[in-house]
Image: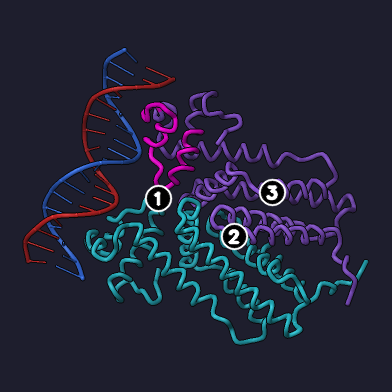
Chain colours: A purple, B cyan, C blue, D red
Amino acid sequence: MTHPGVRADSGSTKHRIIAAAFDALATHGYADLSIKAIGDELGQSPSLIYYHFDDKDDLLLALLDFHLAQFTAEYLDGAGADPETNLRAFVDKLLPETVSADKRTFLRVYAELRAQAAQSEAYREKFTKLDSLLVTTVSDFIEAGIEAGQFADVDVPVAAEHLVGLLLYAMQTRATTTRTASISSIRVALDSVLDDLRGEAVRPSS
Amino acid sequence: MTHPGVRADSGSTKHRIIAAAFDALATHGYADLSIKAIGDELGQSPSLIYYHFDDKDDLLLALLDFHLAQFTAEYLDGAGADPETNLRAFVDKLLPETVSADKRTFLRVYAELRAQAAQSEAYREKFTKLDSLLVTTVSDFIEAGIEAGQFADVDVPVAAEHLVGLLLYAMQTRATTTRTASISSIRVALDSVLDDLRGEAVRPSS
DNA sequence: GTCTATAAGCGGATAGAC
DNA sequence: GTCTATCCGCTTATAGAC
């Protein structure tokens, strides 16, 4: 697994530790993640971690912050084409037809981190913000499309939540099941939702 | 938290241990779950657990099996009305307008258990089966509706996956965020998907 | 079936040398 | 900044009494 911006053998020590923590997380899972395992992955002493972070929790929250920022930068940069093209590109980027092993690893780690939100207020806040950001991004695309006359005058928050919901469901499915047929179906469903945005009366009556 | 069929102070010891494990899970989270915490919740010696289960993993998989069976019995029993009514009842049951504290606790524990599927093949198999079962259940409702002339001739697997996806997304949102507005939007989106099943040309053209 | 006692090791975290 | 050494509590799991 490579870490763009936080490569395994370069960057600040803090970033190398975060990268090592990610790899340890991918290998051992959140429940079995130990400071020692992170040190092993880092190839340095576990106690070094305590010079750079207060404790395990501090490190893991920094890890989450880093990856959420990374994710935002990678997927949520407003694109330069017309609204519908931008929206379809966004959907394709979040739900590509196939995923590399690296991306699948990321989806799994991400799924485990999200589950921490069930227990931890701090995690819950971060994932609440992430989801809101996703919905806002999609809402902006839809609104722009309506103003451009590309989309019908739909209920924007509902349509945005609908699209994001299908996307995140598919990502969870990729992380926690082997249901590949589900992904194909969701891609079809997403297409039909996107088509519906263009106008709800495309199909002829009876 | 009560456990229908596995009440805290009755039933077989095995079941009481599973109930205690659930409560400990709800209190401490999966990562911080210890045998001692389960014993405390049980009000008995932690070592008793090893008489009834091989180890922690064995117990937790039994817990998951029990709750999946419980869930299946509670939510997936084929109802007795017409297909559309059955389907809408199913959706309402999985996504009620409000959730009790108990149900929210269940959603949180469930979210944490699902996340284990990112790491564990055994969990992954179980959640793959659960999701497939949900989709099959919805597919059956839709097929019955098509045969009864209640629904249009839609792509059944896609429509079923679409509905289940929105439902599971909303459940995850309830477990891991504070985005209550999202739930309302998803309920509206679900209604529109259900309405669309009745025929895709309900709305007049231009 | 359930308990007490305990083994044996791992966990997070700190002190202090370099 | 990074390391070695170390503390100590807690963890899983077993042995054996009752």
Mark 1 belongs to which subunit? B
- What secondary structure is found at the residue carrying circle 1? loop
**Residue shown at the point (79%, 52%) measured from the top left:** A142
Res. A174 image quadrant: bottom right
Q: Which residue is mark 3?
A: A96
Q: Is residue A154 above or below residue D10?
A: below
Which chain does the residue under circle 3 lie in?
A
Left or right, A77 with respect to A125, comes to right
Q: Residue at x 39, y 72 (%)?
A: B3
Left or right, B142 with respect to B5, comes to: right
The reply to whether callout 1 and callout 3 are in contact (CB within 8 Å) is no
Main SS, magenta residues: helix
Q: Which mark is residue B31?
A: 1
Mark 1 vs mark 3: in front: 3
Local SS, label 3: loop
Residue B177 in the image: x percent, y percent? 56, 54
Q: Is residue B198 above or below residue A10?
A: below
Please tell me if label 2 and label 1 are on a single chain. no
Q: Are marks 3 and 2 in contact (CB under 8 Å)?
A: no
Chain letter for mark 2, please. A
Image quadrant in which the C terminus of chain A is located: bottom right
Give the quadrant of the N terminus of chain A. top right
How far from the left and from the top, in percent, is residue A87? 78, 49
- Of A179 and A165, nearer the camera is A179
Label 3 crowd bin: few (<14), some (14–19), many (20+), radius 10 Å: few
Q: What residue sits right under mark 2 in the picture? A: A179
| Circle 2: residue type | Arg
Segment tinted magenta in the rendering: A19-48
